[in-house]
């Protein structure tokens, strides 16, 4: 059998056990629904308002009753067979729904949907936007374009609310938000904050109903202050964007068919203005300073004096319909590992799951550290009332080290500073108990001597743990780069085909067969095949190398509607992170990969794992969390699941893609320490734990250099320090120098290559055959993994 038949011939081979297709199958819909329910966070539940009892009489408020937001826009969107919204979710439950209110929203959505632009109209707008120089007007046009893709929240007639209150006992008010690739959210009403229409609706509902439940249908945090402290709102659920089964999953949780067990992957604050990155995020389009340094998310709010008061719901927080106790805590060190054992008991009256979180607090020393840092976590199984489970957590001592970028202890080294390291176990960053164990060092310990890479040249200051700032050295940019050695193997006298690599010919000798022109052509993307719409990696006729089709993610297999193949829309990444269940995330990954493989796609352009530095980043719904350990473990689990099906991931966006405005040219300016401990750490965890086959560089610059052109980032850190064995691709449509990219070790230029530029550089002596061979070899090493 042809080892690469699925790419050469695009066979139609259903992968279901019963001979049916798995793509958008009932089994995958059930898994999507289960994941959406497990990632729904219960933030408030006064007087056990939830779950609702069977036979409850409910009134559903909010346009999401009908127009549920399944996920964000852009490359992370998915063409699905259906979207089960909130009304449909409750229609399957033993409740009485006040129908005139449902009909009001149905009529409104139907009437207003005619004003939603068609795909052709959106494309026309984009053609105008993309031909403009980036400026505030262009950003405004982009924001308005995406805002128009969903209807606005309508004002509900007061008489309809009063009538609903006479027929229903409980009001469920859903607040929905939509964001997308290419544009950031804004701190205004109807986006981060509630609109006047939404406030008026909540006021009226609270005045007329004895029980009010608020549901947030958003891919990223929104301001909760209007209802968090309002006792007339008894329950609050953050349901995120739950994919195509999101409405059913929400109903499962509200009715108690699923006991909520999710925990926040982000801190929710009392105001947007308390974030340290507020001024920098909105300052300009040309650059983005990271003066908050390592103090991101809870690391900021739990450390910086005076900031704890701005936390409404802390990192790791989430309620349940049952209660748990943690007992028998033992913590210690052995063989360079910190280990903690704790027994979790369900002390309530319904089955449930709990998440055990282990944090450490390091000495401040001369480098400074956050007050608390997540080190490990694990979710229990479903525990029956009275049932116990003993959880074991561990992590290497070296993971508590800090990167010394200024040489206060030892320059460019990972350092454990002398002093006492304390450990805390609990169920959120605030709800923890200190263990009896203290890990003490009498002297500083260097755990790894690294190299100065990706240093800042224009970042003037960074935040310290006491809330003050220290100045940073500035200067003229200078970047390292080295050429790759030419392959020494000799090419065979007669051409040998790709299928024979590893059998009759070594990979080095196979690559030696390439002509210079073939090498230059191979490092550029190829046209899509089959149902793929994002192009292919590799592909060469003379040596019979098959092109490997790619497809967008990360919310599912993204195919154009014209293919006639709808696919499963999984919950957004932030929701999956809120499950804190890496086994479940791996299951989602394996199921997503089955759909990808069934449609003869080889590479899924996912998972995305940039850090939630600021809640307004337009693409946060694609990313997991504000914490690199949680995000990294989630991404590693997704990667393992996907690649278990012989489908490759392309982890992205490497790195510091934390703002969408002017993303092709915005310079992320940050310290080496922040880069390594926060923004690269998530990628490092994924690389070391799951061996991703491919990685995608980001559009933005890091400290003055485009990531795809950075030898220091790609060859120095990714390959040299972490031992990454896969291939690296650009993001699609980057305008960066293809010659510098090849030398940097960025193997593939997507969606097309520029062989003419490479030839000119080769002729001028700027590019070597060895540079090209190194990239081609890594691409082929990736392709060899697909052999069946």
Image (spheres, rainbow, N blue to C red):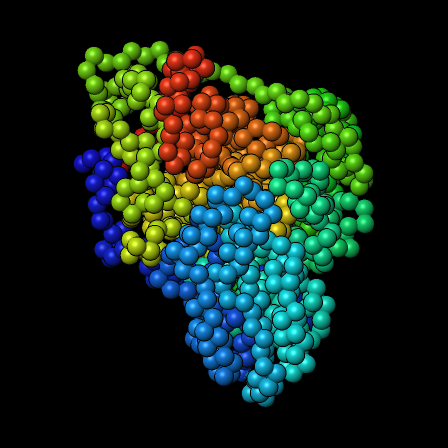
Residue 693 visible in the picture: no
Q: Residue at x 57, y 28 (%)?
A: 705
Q: Where, by quadrant of the figure, is residue 198 drawn?
A: bottom right
The quarter of the rendered structure image containing the C terminus is: top left
Q: Residue at x 69, y 23 (%)?
A: 475
The quarter of the rendered structure image containing the N terminus is: top left
Q: Where, by quadrant of the figure, is residue 41 drawn?
A: bottom right
Of residues 43 and 584, which is closer to you in this image? 43
Q: Is residue 358 above or below residue 264?
A: above
Q: Residue at x 53, y 51 (%)?
A: 142
Of residues 215 and 176, which is closer to you in this image? 176
Residue 362: image location, x then y, percent: 73, 37
Residue 666 visible in the picture: yes
Residue 405: image location, x then y, percent: 69, 26
Residue 99: image location, x then y, percent: 48, 83
| Image side of residue 639 versus residue 597, left or right | right
């Amino acid at each position: 059998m042809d080892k690469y038949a699925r790419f050469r011939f695009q066979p139609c081979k259903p992968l279901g056990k019963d001979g049916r297709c798995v793509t958008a199958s009932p089994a995958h819909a059930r898994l999507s629904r289960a994941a959406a329910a497990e990632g729904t966070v219960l933030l408030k539940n006064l007087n056990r308002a939830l779950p609702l009892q069977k036979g409850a009489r409910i009134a559903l408020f909010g346009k999401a009753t009908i127009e549920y937001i399944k996920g964000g826009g852009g490359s992370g969107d998915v063409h699905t067979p259906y979207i089960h919204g909130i009304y449909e979710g409750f229609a399957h439950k033993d409740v009485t729904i006040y129908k005139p209110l449902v009909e009001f929203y149905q009529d409104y959505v139907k009437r207003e949907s005619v004003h939603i632009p068609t795909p052709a109209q959106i494309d026309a707008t984009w053609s105008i936007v993309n031909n403009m120089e980036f400026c505030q007007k262009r950003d405004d046009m982009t924001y308005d374009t995406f805002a128009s893709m969903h209807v606005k929240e309508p004002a509900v007639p007061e008489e309809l609310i009063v009538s609903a209150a006479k027929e229903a006992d409980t009001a469920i008010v859903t607040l929905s938000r939509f964001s997308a690739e290419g544009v950031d959210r804004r701190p205004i009403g109807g986006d981060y904050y509630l609109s006047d229409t939404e406030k008026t609706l909540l006021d009226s509902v609270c005045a007329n109903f004895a029980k009010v439940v608020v549901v947030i249908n958003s891919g990223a945090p929104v301001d909760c202050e209007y209802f968090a402290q309002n006792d007339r709102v008894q329950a609050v659920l953050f349901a995120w964007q739950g994919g195509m089964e999101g409405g059913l999953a929400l109903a499962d949780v509200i009715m108690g068919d699923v006991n909520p067990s999710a925990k926040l992957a982000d801190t929710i604050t009392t105001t947007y203005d308390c974030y340290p990155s507020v001024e920098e995020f909105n300052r300009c389009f040309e650059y983005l300073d990271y003066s908050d340094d390592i103090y991101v998310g809870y690391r900021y709010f739990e450390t910086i004096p005076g900031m704890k008061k701005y936390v409404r719901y802390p990192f790791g927080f989430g309620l349940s319909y049952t209660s748990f106790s943690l007992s028998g805590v033992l913590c210690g060190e052995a063989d360079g590992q910190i280990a903690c054992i704790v027994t979790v008991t369900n002390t309530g009256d319904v089955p449930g799951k709990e998440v055990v979180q282990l944090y450490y607090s390091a000495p401040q020393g001369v480098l400074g550290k956050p007050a608390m840092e997540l080190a490990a976590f694990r979710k229990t199984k479903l525990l029956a009332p009275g049932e116990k489970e003993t959880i074991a957590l561990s992590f290497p001592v070296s993971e508590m080290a800090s990167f010394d970028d200024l040489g206060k202890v030892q320059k460019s080294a990972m350092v454990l500073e002398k002093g006492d390291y304390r450990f805390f176990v609990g169920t959120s960053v605030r709800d923890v108990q200190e263990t009896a164990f203290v890990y003490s060092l009498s002297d500083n310990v260097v755990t790894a001597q690294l190299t100065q890479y990706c240093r800042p040249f224009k970042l003037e200051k960074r935040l310290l743990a006491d809330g003050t700032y220290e100045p940073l050295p500035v200067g003229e940019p200078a970047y390292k780069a080295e050429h790759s050695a030419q392959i020494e193997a000799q090419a065979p006298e007669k051409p040998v085909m790709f299928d024979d690599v590893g059998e009759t010919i070594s990979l080095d000798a196979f690559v030696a067969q390439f002509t210079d022109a073939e090498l230059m052509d191979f490092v550029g993307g190829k046209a899509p095949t089959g149902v793929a719409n994002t192009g292919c990696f590799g592909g060469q006729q003379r040596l019979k190398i098959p092109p490997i089709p790619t497809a967008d993610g990360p919310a599912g297999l993204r195919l154009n509607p014209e293919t006639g193949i709808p696919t499963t829309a999984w919950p957004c990444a932030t929701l999956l992170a809120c499950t804190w269940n890496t086994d479940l995330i791996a299951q989602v990954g394996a199921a997503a990969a089955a759909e990808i493989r069934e449609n003869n796609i080889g590479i899924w352009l996912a998972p995305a794992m940039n850090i939630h530095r600021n809640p307004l980043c337009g693409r946060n719904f694609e990313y997991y969390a504000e914490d690199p350990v949680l995000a990294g473990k989630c991404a590693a689990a997704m990667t393992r699941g996907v690649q278990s099906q012989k489908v490759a991931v392309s982890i992205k966006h490497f790195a510091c893609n934390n703002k969408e405005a002017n993303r092709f040219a915005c310079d992320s300016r940050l310290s080496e320490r922040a880069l390594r401990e926060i923004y690269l750490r998530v990628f490092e965890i994924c690389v070391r734990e799951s061996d991703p086959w491919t990685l995608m560089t980001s559009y933005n610059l890091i400290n003055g250099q485009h990531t795809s052109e950075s030898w220091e980032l790609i060859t120095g850190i990714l390959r040299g320090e972490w031992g990454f064995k896969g291939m690296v691709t650009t993001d699609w449509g980057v305008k960066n120098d293809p010659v510098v990219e090849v030398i940097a070790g960025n193997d593939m230029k997507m969606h097309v290559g520029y062989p003419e530029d490479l030839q000119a550089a080769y002729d001028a002596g700027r590019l070597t055959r060895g540079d090209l061979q190194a990239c081609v070899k890594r691409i082929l090493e990736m392709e060899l993994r697909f052999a069946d």
